């Protein structure tokens, strides 16, 4: 493909070289450059791609896209733009032939519930006989094949590559989580979403957005930008900001909720350790539903998915089958099998609100003590740490504060910030700091008695632990299973 074709629609401040040079690949990692590549230099929080332009050229790049002037060998094209992050979205769209235009994109944004809602929608579409792909936090599902996910919403080039693969496989719908980072960084620039879902909003990612107002603006922007003529917005009306976000879009809106008289709502909710039962009330009348998911927060996720199904013209029976066929979501109130008379739950909850929802649900279900193991990620919003400590103090009988993904921060400092919040709420509470996450999980499981529940929060489905300069394999579920086997003598 000619470079000029790839650059269509992109505002270029400086250009040097042959616009018709053939380009065989587009990459943002200099190590992945092959002869004939276009290398895009991105500025990240820790690394600046401009430092690797020379390496990219040495590996055979035919062109480089930069924000700053660079000196390269004669014959190498230089494309200078104002923002390479934003430009790569159009580059990806052009290079892969705008595959998104051939797909019906369903985007889900919100602080909590994106992953589970995406899984539920995908399951409903399958029940309806539709071929659908999935892009999100746990993994990407492309033509029935799981591919690892690095980010909740992939970088633009990767996103369009996934779209192109799905088009080849004759996919009709793509269900994708849309993170606030993806919106702010322009990863979804140029995409026309067929449906947009807003689940909720609460404190998160303030290390990136700085203020909650900015975070809210970013989330609102996604719904506001839905094409009025073709899209529909699915909005949680129980969220304090739901009506405000609904008012921001010209697209048709469909509301759901438990507290409000929403068009799609749930009644007669009953939760056990195995399932959640409720009546779905909506365009199809009253439909009794069973979820293999636990808790009130999952009723909200199911309502979002149901409202989405109704927006596509699906009937209540199809929606019922779709919701019932989902066995569970990895790392989302996932119960670890044991032979004992205690329960272990692994969950991804890593914000104050999600931890509160998790522990509130656990509190209702537990017969004896609630033992909580959690930490907070390093190089992320520090303000949430004492808040999460307070929540653990309020709802847990025993808390073990441990490492999450400390990244480049001092784990002891993170733990002390959490502990300060805990002690502010409950000065004489049962709390221990044990930074070794594996040992923390082990101790929690070993102390569990009949009727106790051990809740391990923060990492959920993740299979590694980030210490900044290095990562190690770590899986909460594996650690819990090993501890349970030790406890049970097998």
Image: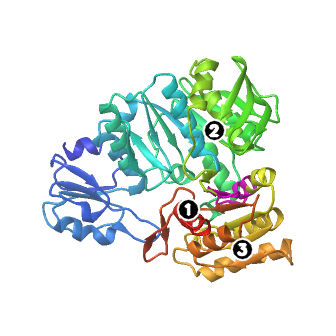
Q: In the rendered structure, which disc, 2 or 3, sits on the residue that comes first in sequence?
A: 2
Name the quadrant of the C terminus: bottom right
Q: Residue furthest front?
A: 489
In the image, residue 8 above or below residue 61: above
Name the quadrant of the N terminus: top left
Q: Observer-nearest residue: 389 or 4?
A: 389
Tag 2 near tag 1, CB within 8 Å? no
| Residue 222 visible | no
- Which element type, helix, strand or loop, lies under badge 1? helix
Q: How far apart, in angstroms, are the residues tagged by discs 3 and 1?
A: 26 Å
Query: Is 353 in the magenta?
Result: yes
- Which element type, helix, strand or loop, lies under badge 2? loop
For residue 292, the mark is 2
Q: Circle 3 sits on which residue?
A: 418
At label 2, counting other C-alpha atoms closer than 10 Å, the crowd grade (few under 14, some 14-19, many 20 or more) is: some
Residue 281 place in picture, x, y as percent: 75, 23
Q: In the rendered structure, which disc, 3 or 1, sits on the residue that comes first in sequence?
A: 3
Residue 305 place in picture, x, y as percent: 61, 32
Q: Tell whether 126 sits left or right of 197.
A: left
- Which element type, helix, strand or loop, lies under badge 3? helix
Q: Circle 1 sits on which residue?
A: 481
Magenta extent: 340-358
Q: How far apart, in angstroms, are the residues tagged by discs 2 and 1?
A: 21 Å
| Residue at x 64%, y 32% (from the top left corner) | 234
Tag 3 near tag 1, CB within 8 Å? no
For residue 338, the mark is none
Residue 240 place in picture, x, y as percent: 78, 44
Q: Observer-nearest residue: 444 or 459?
A: 444
């Amino acid at each position: 493909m000619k470079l000029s074709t790839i650059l269509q629609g992109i505002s270029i401040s400086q250009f040097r070289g042959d616009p018709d040079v053939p380009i065989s690949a587009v990459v943002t990692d200099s190590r992945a450059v092959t002869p004939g590549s276009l290398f895009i230099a991105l500025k990240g929080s820790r690394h600046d791609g401009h430092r690797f332009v020379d390496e990219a050229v040495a590996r055979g790049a035919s062109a480089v896209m930069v924000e700053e002037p660079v000196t390269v060998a004669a014959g190498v094209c230089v494309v200078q733009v104002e923002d390479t992050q934003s430009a790569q979205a159009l580059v990806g769209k052009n290079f892969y032939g705008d595959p998104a235009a051939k797909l019906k994109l369903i985007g889900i944004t919100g602080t909590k519930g994106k992953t589970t809602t995406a899984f539920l929608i995908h399951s409903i579409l399958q029940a309806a006989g539709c071929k659908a792909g999935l892009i999100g936090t746990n993994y990407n599902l492309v033509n029935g094949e799981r591919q690892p996910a690095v980010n909740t919403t992939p970088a633009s080039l990767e996103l369009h590559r996934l779209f192109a693969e799905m088009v080849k496989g004759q996919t009709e719908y793509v269900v994708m989580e849309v993170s606030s980072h993806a919106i702010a960084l322009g990863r979804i620039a140029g995409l026309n979403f067929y449906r947009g879902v807003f689940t909720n909003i609460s404190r998160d990612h303030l290390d990136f957005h700085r203020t909650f107002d900015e975070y809210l603006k970013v989330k609102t922007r996604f719904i506001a930008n839905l094409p009025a003529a073709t899209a529909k917005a699915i909005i949680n009306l129980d969220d304090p900001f739901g009506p405000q976000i609904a008012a921001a879009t010209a697209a048709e809106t469909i509301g759901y909720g438990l507290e409000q008289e929403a068009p799609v709502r749930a009644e007669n909710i009953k939760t056990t350790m195995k399932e959640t039962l409720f009546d779905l009330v909506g365009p199809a009348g009253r439909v009794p539903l069973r979820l293999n998911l636990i808790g009130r927060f999952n009723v909200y996720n199911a309502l979002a998915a149901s409202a989405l199904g109704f927006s596509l013209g699906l009937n209540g029976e199809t929606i019922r089958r779709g919701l019932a066929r989902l066995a569970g979501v990895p790392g989302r109130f996932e119960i670890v099998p044991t032979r004992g008379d205690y329960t272990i739950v692994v969950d991804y909850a890593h914000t104050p609100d999600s931890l509160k929802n998790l522990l509130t649900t656990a509190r209702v279900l537990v017969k004896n003590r609630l033992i909580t193991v959690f930490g907070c990620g390093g190089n992320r919003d520090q303000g949430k740490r004492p808040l999460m400590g307070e929540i653990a103090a309020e709802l847990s009988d025993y808390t073990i504060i441990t490492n999450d993904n400390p990244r480049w921060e001092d784990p002891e400092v993170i733990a002390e910030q959490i502990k300060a919040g805990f002690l502010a709420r409950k000065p004489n509470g049962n709390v221990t700091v044990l930074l070794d996450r594996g040992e923390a999980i082990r101790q929690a499981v070993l102390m569990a008695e009949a009727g106790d529940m051990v809740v391990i929060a923060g990492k959920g489905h993740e299979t590694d632990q980030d210490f900044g300069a290095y990562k190690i394999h770590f899986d909460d579920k594996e650690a819990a299973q090993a501890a349970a086997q030790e406890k049970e003598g097998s």
